[in-house]
Amino acid sequence: MLPPAGVGRHRRLRLSDVPEFRDRRRVARRLGLEEMTRQAGEDDLSGQSAGDYADALDRARHRG
């Protein structure tokens, strides 16, 4: 675990910790996107309008 120093809503990291922090955030983002894509497939959203898809993703985010 990286030891960030909290400053309000910001975090401060040692420069040497930045690559690990960046990589962890990338992995978390990718996993979240994969989960939303999986849920969209389960909800059979292919062929839906962009607005319908966005609404479904919003519901999925609040589902769990």
Image (cartoon, rainbow, N blue to C red):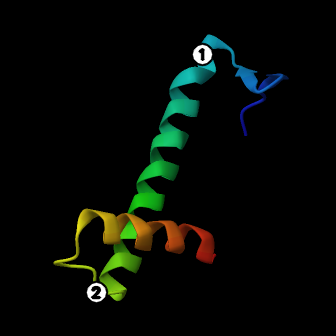
Query: Which residue: 43% across, 69% down?
Result: 55
Q: Position of residue 28 (x, y in %)?
A: 52, 51
Q: Residues within 10 Å of mark 2 (few under 14, many from 20)?
A: few
- In the image, taking residue 11 as reference, residue 59 lies left or right, namely left
Quickly name the residue at label 1: 16
Residue lying farthest top?
15
- In the image, taking residue 53 as reference, residue 30 lies left or right, namely right
Marks 1/2: CA–CA distance: 44 Å
The quarter of the rendered structure image containing the C terminus is bottom right
Q: Is residue 7 visible?
A: yes
Query: Which residue: 35% across, 87% down?
Result: 42
Q: Is residue 35 visible?
A: no
Front residue of 52 and 44: 52
Q: Is residue 16 above or below residue 51?
A: above
Which of labels 1 and 2 is toward the front? 2
- Secondary structure at numbered mark 1: helix
Q: Is residue 36 above or below residue 25?
A: below
Q: Position of residue 36 (x, y in %)?
A: 42, 68
Q: Position of residue 59 (x, y in %)?
A: 52, 73
Which kind of residue does numbered mark 2 sit on?
Asp
Q: Position of residue 17 (x, y in %)?
A: 62, 22
Quickly name the residue at label 2: 44
Identify the image quadrant of residue 1: top right
Query: Which residue: 42% across, 74% down?
Result: 56
Front residue of 56 and 27: 56
- Secondary structure at numbered mark 2: loop
Which kind of residue does numbered mark 1 sit on?
Ser
- In the image, taking residue 20 as reference, residue 47 lies left or right, namely left
Identify the image quadrant of residue 62: bottom right
